[in-house]
Image (cartoon, helix red, strand yellow):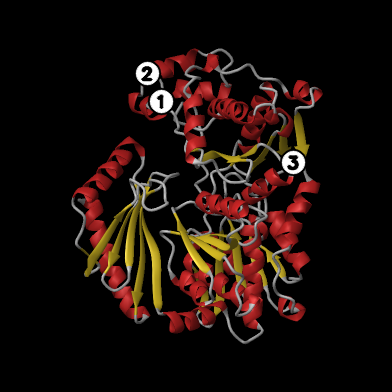
Amino acid sequence: MDYLDKYQMWQQAEGMEEELRKELQAIQGDDKAIYERFYQDLSFGTAGLRGIIGAGTNRMNVYTVQKATAALALYLLAHTGKDAFTEGVVIAYDSRHYSERFAEEAALMLNSFGIKTYLFDRPTPTPELSFAIRHLQAAGGIVITASHNPKEYNGYKVYHRQGVQATEAMAAEIAENMARYETLESLPIMLNRELAQERNLYHTIGSAVHQAYQQAVLQQKRLTDKNAKANLRIVYTPLHGTGLRPVQEVLKQAGFSDVNLVASQSDYDGDFSTVDVPNPEDKAALALAIARGEEIKADLILGTDPDSDRIGTAVATAQGYQLLSGNQIGALLVDYLVQQQGAQSKEGSTLIKTIVTSDLGAAIAAKAGIEVLETLTGFKYIGEKMVEFAHSGKQSFFMGYEESYGYLVGDHARDKDAVVAALLISEMAAYWKAQGLTLVDRLEKLYQDYGYYLDGIFSYTLPGVDGQEKIKNLMAALRQAPPTVLGQLTVQEVKDYQGGLGNLPPSDVLKYYLADGSWAAIRPSGTEPKIKFYYSIRAEDKEKAADIREILQQDIEKIING
């Protein structure tokens, strides 16, 4: 069917959700709007589905969720057989619009195949979903979230029984299964909740799992100095998301008694009404928390995104609050863990980072005798390595992190975890404060020891069909004619990951190694209509690095603008 055929099919479908039907009627005769909604089906990849909420095959709605879940059910039955019926699937959801509804639709679709489901009783962090799959010995998991995307978005992610996001092979098979359901009428007939409960298929989980997860997080405590923890003043904002309860509870149980919540951002609000975008990487998202910090003279600002897998951090300095990047916090955490474990590292202890993450943390780890392993962008690759370590026993997981504000310490989850990160960031802030230092002070000392690093991203949003085509053409052009100079530095080596490099699977990434040890990498986003230019500049000081960055940005904008 072409896009107009699909539009007509949806308009004429019996039992169509009234809200969606009205949307379809509102765009009647608007060919561009119809095309945007129906020219493709939302594609299912290792990050699942993500898209704007609304009517159409290229939108997130109950039918998209039903289709993906039916495809997952077929996958589970093919690969786990009768175990899928008895082990079941855990389902979590965040605070976004329709998240709870989509989670219930997913549960009931699985129930319609005879598969048990365990649905959380409230908005729950993504890392807790990862934990719960193994805790309950389930066959897999689903989380309804669009992470830190704008309010118009929602998404659907699948996890396998090891608590890791879907592998490439699993995602490809689910996508193939989705193609079986071309029409709405071809979707399986669904059970209602009452009948599913009567058949012992639909279950709600809550406090017991929440408490088990929090206790697992607390196992990662390192700091024993009670006074240091009591003397740290923290401001925390969940940005209207799922971190609200677990972050506060974990910090309280760990001994942090001076934690101050940003009250106006403590409700579950799918409009994220106090911020433009609920992204803790963005300074604007932490503006209210910083204002509260200034008011009460807090030492540390923490903010988690809606599904509480990413965390942003700001530190009080004499010049005001300074935001720390994902790369900086990652390096500081590596340093803190090394400080806490002493000079002797465990044999096989391994730090896992992504290919677009700064090398500062790796340098700190290597000096301490900790092995360093690189993966592709996406925490699922870190999770897959954790599974390999558990099976082989040859290496142990020290820590994993990526530049996009995602960290994991401990093996309770196999995805980035802002709850455990909040605990350990608070600990290291308290640890260094007890020695008269801030996290910024400690970072400056690391720069003195390892060299100055300036890391970041230039991100360009190119929405719609035209934007996707431009991104595709841009990557093709760069492969055909790679730049020889970036930031006035000679490009000494180009790595193209498209065909896979070493033990890494294929990925649409280009990385340029520059003459002074700096690098830049280019990668289309897998979840948003963006192309991202990552950079890591090595220089003798901050001023020199800033000069290189400015020239690098000019070069990249010339590439974007053709």
Residue where numbered disc 1 is placed: 38
Distance, label 3 to label 1, CA atoms, is 34 Å
Q: Position of residue 505 (x, y in %)?
A: 41, 47
User: Is 156 drawn above or below residue 556 in the view shown?
Assistant: above
Q: Mark 2 or 3 closer to N-term?
A: 2
Query: Going 56% across and 77% down the picture, which residue do you hit?
Result: 439
SS for dot 3: loop
Q: Position of residue 432 (x, y in %)?
A: 62, 81
User: Is 392 drawn above or below residue 5 in the view shown?
Assistant: below
Distance, label 2 to label 1, CA atoms, is 7 Å
SS for dot 2: helix
Query: Going 58% across and 61% down the picture, which residue do you hit?
Result: 395
Q: Residue 355 shows which numbered tag?
A: none
Residue where numbered disc 2 is placed: 4
At label 2, counting other C-alpha atoms closer than 10 Å, the crowd grade (few under 14, some 14-19, many 20 or more) is some
User: Is 359 drawn above or below residue 273 in the view shown?
Assistant: below
Q: Quadrant of residue 63?
A: top right
- Verify CB contact (< 8 Å) between mark 2 and mark 1: yes
Q: Mark 3 or 1 closer to N-term?
A: 1
Distance, label 2 to label 3, CA atoms, is 40 Å
